[in-house]
């Protein structure tokens, strides 16, 4: 029997990245509202800041798939991209290709011309582009130049730049200084962690709690409210609890699996 069947769940938790499973806790709802504000008020750039594992990528992917419907800016084209591995010209080529629907041939000048033509037409149609840029701290020097050049153009575009808190000072070219609003994804409070775990199990068909209150407090303490660590601890604890045929996941189970994580959170 699979561990999730043991807990009377309809499927394995934390494996489905579809938008309808995206957890919108209080801090996430606040971040969504701020992104919608930037788009609705035609602002040029905002920054989404949080620790590694805080949910920046998940949030941007959600927004790119299920965009906010702002009455102030109803005609918005949403694009998600990551700066990981991108060299000079590749970001511009990707954006031009996705907006025009034509395959990029690798020529940066052609990509810039394509973008300029697109935004001339977009302005006539009152169309705005929301570019959701993930992993900005991983951008190469050439890719950072592309971002700076995009911001220098009179394009009807809003950029949301996701950056790790610890690496924000490594971003060059004055990109962060140009931000008109900083959107923070803080660590979750224990109440949000408890709500998240209850929401996950309910969405998978189980009404009764799986985790004891003390177990949730221990998850909170060990994870320090970091969503990625919460999921890692929770998933391992569900497996361990099923193996031991426990009735609930208790604090002892959480402490046991904490030592099994790659970055030992119990240390």
Image: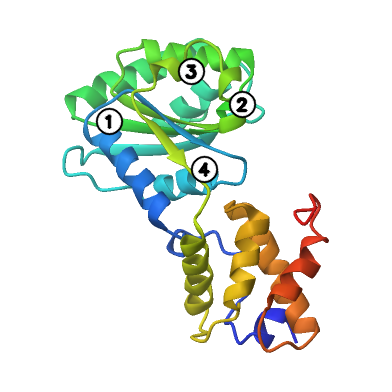
Q: CA distance from mark 2 to mark 1?
A: 30 Å
Give the image quarter of residue 13: bottom right
Q: Are marks 3 and 1 in contact (CB under 8 Å)?
A: no
Find disc 3 in the rendering and name its residue: 147
**Relative to residue 221, is residue 212 depicted above or below?**
below
Query: Is residue 137 found left or right of 158 in the rendered image?
Result: right
User: Disc 3 or disc 4, which is closer to the eye?
Assistant: 4
**Relative to residue 240, is residue 222 depicted above or below?**
above
Q: Residue at x 30, y 45 (%)?
A: 33
**Relative to residue 146, is residue 66 depicted above or below?**
below
Q: Give the image location of residue 135, x and y in percent.
A: 58, 32
Query: Is residue 16 found left or right of 192 in the rendered image?
Result: right
Query: Is residue 115 found left or right of 84 in the rendered image?
Result: left
Q: CA distance from mark 3 to mark 2?
A: 17 Å
**Element class at badge 4:** helix
Q: CA distance from mark 3 to mark 4?
A: 19 Å
**Element class at badge 3:** helix
Quarter holding the N terminus?
Answer: bottom right
- Pick whichever of labels 2 and 4 is earlier in the sequence: 4
- Pick whichever of labels 3 and 4 is earlier in the sequence: 4
**Element class at badge 1:** strand
Find disc 4 in the rendering and name its residue: 56
Find disc 1 in the rendering and name its residue: 128
Find disc 2 in the rendering and name its residue: 167
Q: Residues within 10 Å of mark 2 (few under 14, many from 20)?
A: some
Q: CA distance from mark 2 to mark 4?
A: 14 Å
- Pick whichever of labels 4 and 1 is earlier in the sequence: 4
Q: How many marks are shown on the rendered structure? A: 4
Q: Are marks 3 and 2 in contact (CB under 8 Å)?
A: no
**Relative to residue 169, is residue 251 depicted above or below?**
below
Q: Residues within 10 Å of mark 3 (few under 14, many from 20)?
A: many
Q: Residue at x 28, y 38 (%)?
A: 76
């Amino acid at each position: 029997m699979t561990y999730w069947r043991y807990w009377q769940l309809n499927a394995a938790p934390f494996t489905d990245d579809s938008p309808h499973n995206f957890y919108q806790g209080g801090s996430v709802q606040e971040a969504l509202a701020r992104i919608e504000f930037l788009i609705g008020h035609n602002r040029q750039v905002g920054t989404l800041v949080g620790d590694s594992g805080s949910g920046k990528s998940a949030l941007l992917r959600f927004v790119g798939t299920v965009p906010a419907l702002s009455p102030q800016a109803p005609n918005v084209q949403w694009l998600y991209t990551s700066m990981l591995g991108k060299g000079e010209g590749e970001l511009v080529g990707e954006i031009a290709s996705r907006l025009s629907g034509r395959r990029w041939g690798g020529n940066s000048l052609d990509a810039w011309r394509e973008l300029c033509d697109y935004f001339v037409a977009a302005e006539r149609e009152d169309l705005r582009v929301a570019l959701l840029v993930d992993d900005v701290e991983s951008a190469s020097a050439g890719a950072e130049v592309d971002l700076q050049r995009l911001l220098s153009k009179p394009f009807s575009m809003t950029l949301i730049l996701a950056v790790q808190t610890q690496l924000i000072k490594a971003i060059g070219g004055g990109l962060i200084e140009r931000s008109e609003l900083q959107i923070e994804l803080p660590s979750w409070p224990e109440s949000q962690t408890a709500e998240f775990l209850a929401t996950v199990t309910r969405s998978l068909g189980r009404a009764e709690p799986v985790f004891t209150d003390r177990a949730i407090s221990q998850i909170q303490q060990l994870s320090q409210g970091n969503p990625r660590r919460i999921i890692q601890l929770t998933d391992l604890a569900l497996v361990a609890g099923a193996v031991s045929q426990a009735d609930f996941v208790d604090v002892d189970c959480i402490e046991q699996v904490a030592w099994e994580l790659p970055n030992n959170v119990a240390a």
